[in-house]
Image: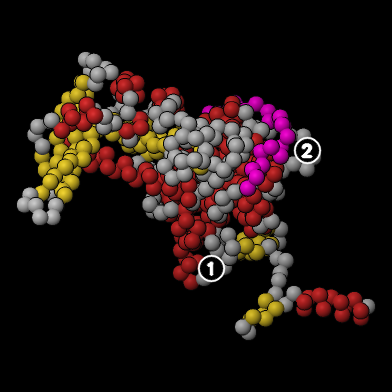
Amino acid sequence: IKAKVRDRTMQSESTKRTYQGVRVEYTSKPVSGWGGIVSFTRFMQGLGVRELLDRALPDGRTSNNQVGVTDMILQFMVTVLTGGKRFEHVERIRGDEVVRVAVGAKRFGSPSSLTRYLGNFLPSQTEHLQERLMEMVFGTLGSGSDVLDLDSTVFIRYGKQEGSSRGYNPHKRKLVSHHPLLAMLAKTKVIVHAWLRAGSASPHRGAQEFLRELVSQLPKNFHIEALRADSGFYSKAFLSLLEELGIPYVLATNMERNFKSWCASRPGWQPVSSDIDVTEGRYESSKQRGVFRRMVIIRKAIRRDKDNVLFVITDYKYQAFVTTLSTEAVDVWRFYMKRGDCENRIKELKYDFGADSFCLHSFTGTEAAFRLIVFTFNLMAIFNTAILRDPKITLGMVRHKVFVIGALVGTSGRKTILRLGLKNRWREEFETLLIRLSSWTTSTAAQLVQTLETRGSERPSPWKLRTNPMRFLLPN
């Protein structure tokens, strides 16, 4: 008996270390640094995200030791929120008891379970998932109006994944990529539609089908004030579709040689600043005779001073926009320039949510992961606006201010308790956040859940293992 006691004492003391007068010991108690994630998981609970995923996710697995697909997808979403950038990072929170309790999951799965599940998605299952997820996002929008911005971006790939090919890639031209298409609302900062496309796709490829699909899914009482897009979307077919749908628009045009000469010959230039002038005119494209569209033209002076010369050489850089808006030309230009804010949404989607990092060999599986990340992005945008009341705050800052809180899981009687390491004003601020969250979910989310229960009752087709699951794991 004395020998056993001595062995245990030596074993416990061997784990103790002293650094600069502070002794380091270890504990097996469920402690985590992500205690603040409970605020967002309560937000999702109030919205009915778990119930939504139960109806949207396919399942047909037969293993007796399987992890629930909803728990697995919630684990993936929380991994993104806590800074994960690879499927392997799912392992970080797999053993985090605090996060598991906050999410309300029975168990968390391994990275291979997640990649095997997503990698065997069918296109129809991905589309069904997207429809159900966007129903919740559209339900939070309700009635009203907003400005719609279209843009595309590049997801660089380092392998031979399905759909990855060489295309527009301004930074690493020799690498393959995917070329997603995004539609974003300017006021609410929500991504209302997203497609993952092959890397060789041009910006306007599939843009008409993309817009038609988006318009068909928008709530009937929601109005698009105007659509803004860069010159990649400028085409006769796309402009005709916008006019057919009755959507006001401002699009940057392609500055071809003949069109640039036409812009330079326009009269009536009005100064906007010391080096910027604006004018307008009605232009008939050679590809669409008989159709005249309003063009707002901007010229920027580029002055070049030469040494030992008595005069200044002035060149002009031209930029033109086609529009159906009736406002003043300078107001059209300023309205379009506000579109630059959508680039911040794309940057946040990449840098904070890791949208360009989660990739499988299967194109459909990669698209399913991408759309789940977009859904997480939208939930965070709604959370920032409704709960944090700061629509401009980024996920990186939310992690620092809200999510990173030391926490411990305990019990009181038969109830599980999450104890957060907060005091003084930090505790008061977090408690205020929880009170605000409870009030919002009671009044707003209850109506949303009731609306969703009457829609989307169709179940997806059963999930099946179709290929070797190791095929869906990336080399990196």
Q: Is residue 22 left or right of residue 43?
A: right
Residue 14, quarter of picture: bottom right
Residue appearing at x 57%, y 43% in the figure:
158
Horizontal and vertical percent for residue 10?
82, 78
Q: Farthest residue toward the right?
A: 1
Q: Main secondary structure of the magenta part?
A: loop
Distance, label 1 to label 2, CA atoms, is: 42 Å
Horizontal and vertical percent for residue 453?
55, 32
Q: Which residue is mark 2?
A: 63
Horizontal and vertical percent for residue 396?
47, 56
Mark 2 surroundings: few (<14), some (14-19) or many (≥20) residues within 10 A: few
Image height of 95 relative to 342, above or below: below
**Mark 1 vs 2, N-terminal side:** 2
Between marks 1 and 2 in the image, the one whose residue lies nearer the viewer: 2
Quadrant where the image shows the N terminus: bottom right
Q: Which residue is mark 1?
A: 422
Image height of 285 relative to 67, above or below: above
Q: Secondary structure at mark 1?
A: loop
Residue appearing at x 44%, y 26% in the figure:
206
Residue appearing at x 51%, y 48% in the figure:
353
Q: Is residue 126 magenta?
A: no
Task: Return the residue nearer the eye: 151 or 126.
Answer: 151
In the image, the segment drawn in magenta is: 454-476
Q: Secondary structure at mark 2?
A: loop
Q: Is residue 194 visible?
A: no
Q: Amino acid at mark 2?
A: Ser
Q: Amino acid at mark 1?
A: Leu
